[in-house]
Image (cartoon, grey):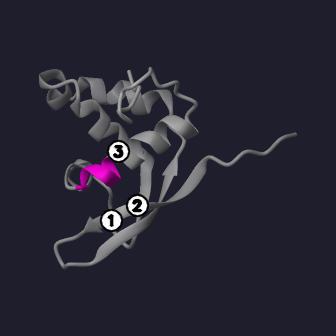
Amino acid sequence: MTVFSTEVEFTLPLGYRDGDGTLHRQGVMRLATAADEILPLKDHRVQANPAYLTVLVLARVVVRLGSLDMINAKVIEDLFMADYTYLQTLYNKINGVEQEGGNGGAPAMR
């Protein structure tokens, strides 16, 4: 029987600075489930702007970031682009998502 890890540790290139000024760089992302990509499609923010799907999916699969109590869409929205792109690339890599040529690290999430 082969055992595989469902979580991957990461270090953000720049880091997320919370309201108290604490910098959070180390985190954990888990493998996505079908629900992680399907359930956010019902969200009004995704219906108004399909690009917002990435924010909601990342908020679901990033299970730890530094000492933050909770990861939500606002945390993902407030990331620097370098960190946001890093997480998109990591998501695609660990979930076996094929990226189409030249998308600049944008997620291939459906």
Give the residue number, with chain letter if any, for mark 3: 85
Q: Residues within 10 Å of mark 1 (few under 14, many from 20)?
A: many
Tell me the tag on residue 30: none
Q: Is residue 6 magenta?
A: no
Judging depth in this view, the residue of 101 and 36 nearest the camera is 101
Up-down relation of residue 93 to residue 98 (above or below): below
The residue that appears at 25% across and 24% down in the rendered structure is: 42
- Check contact, mark 2 vs mark 3: CB within 8 A: no
Q: Residue, x 24% and y 70% (percent of image)?
A: 17
Q: Is residue 82 magenta?
A: yes
Q: Looking at the figure, which quarter contains the C terminus?
A: top left
User: Counting residues from the N terminus, which is met first, the one under dot 2 or under dot 3?
Assistant: 2
Q: Quarter of the image for the N terminus: give it.
A: top right
Helix, strand or loop under label 3: helix
On the question of residue 60 being in view, the answer is: no
- Tag 2 and tag 1, C-beta contact below 8 Å: yes
Which stretch is magenta?
A: 79-84
Helix, strand or loop at disc 2?
A: strand
The amino acid marked with disc number 3 is Thr
